Structures are given as structure tokens and as C-alpha cells.
Amino acid sequence: MGVDLYDLWRPNSGLTPRKVLWLVGQLPQSSAFAASCRGGAEFRPWTVETYLLAAIANLLQAANRQRAGKRSAKPVVEPPKPKRKPKRVVTVSEIIRRREQRASNSGNTHP
């Protein structure tokens, strides 16, 4: 990101701990910091290139098995399955509570 962390200790640098924390929050999921938070370099997400290399390895393995006259086996490389976020369920009581909070914050007594 082009920021020298030593500037935190240099006088009049303008870099504050708050700014550093904000910058860390802006790092992409593929960064070394995000991977280390998840457990290490092996937890970096797959890139487009990684998916393409896995597809090439699987196609080569299938082609070699086909030339040998064998049935196709499991792919050599299994790409990770995308994680889906669970759908958020909003209850009626939550909607009513939020309306009441907005009404009390704005000073209105009518929803």
C-alpha cells in the first residue's frame, strides 16, 4: 500500500495508529495479513490463475487415463467450493422494534 510503518515512530510523519488500523482493514482477502489471520499462507484464496492451473492438471490427467484405456477417475485437484452466506431472516418483531427506535430517535411518535 506504499506506507512505511516506521513512520509511526518518526516525528511529524502524520501517520497515526488509527490510520494504520484503517489501512489494515482495507487489505484484500488475498493479502499475507489476511492469510496469517486464517492460519497461514496455505489459507490464501484461489486466484483465477490457480483455478485455470487446476483445470489444466485435471484435463491432462483425464486425457492420459483415456489414452491408457482406463475409466476416468476423480480429478487430481479439487477446487474449493464457494462458501455461501446464510440468508438473513428478519422477524416481524425486529422490524417493529427498528421502526420504534427510528421514531424515538427522530422525535416522532408516529411510525
Image: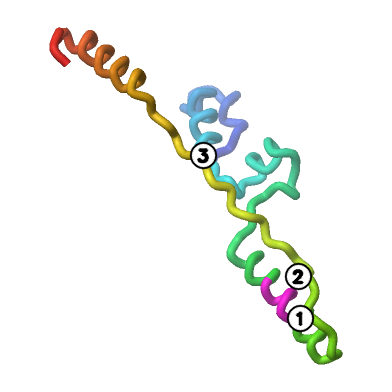
Amino acid type of the residue tagged 1 in the rendering: Ala
Q: CA distance from mark 2 to mark 3?
A: 29 Å
Q: Which residues are magenta?
A: 55-59
Q: Nearer the viewer, residue 51 or 92?
A: 92
The residue tagged with tag 1: helix, strand or loop? helix
Q: CA distance from mark 2 to mark 1?
A: 8 Å
Q: Say the numbered circle drawn on residue 86.
A: 3
Q: Is residue 13 visible?
A: no
Query: Badge 1 is on which residue?
Result: 62
Query: Badge 2 is on which residue?
Result: 75
Name the spot of residue 98 as percent of width and height, x first.
30, 18
Above or below residue 93? Residue 53 is below
The residue tagged with tag 2: helix, strand or loop? loop
Name the spot of residue 85 as percent of width and height, x first.
52, 42
First in sequence, mark 3 or 1: give its number: 1
Q: Residue at x 48, y 28 (%)?
A: 19
- 58 is within the stretch colored magenta: yes
Tell me the quarter of the picture where residue 79 sits. bottom right
Q: Residue at x 44, y 34 (%)?
A: 88
Amino acid type of the residue tagged 3 in the rendering: Pro
Disc 2 to disc 1: CB gap under 8 Å: yes
- 12 is within the stretch colored magenta: no
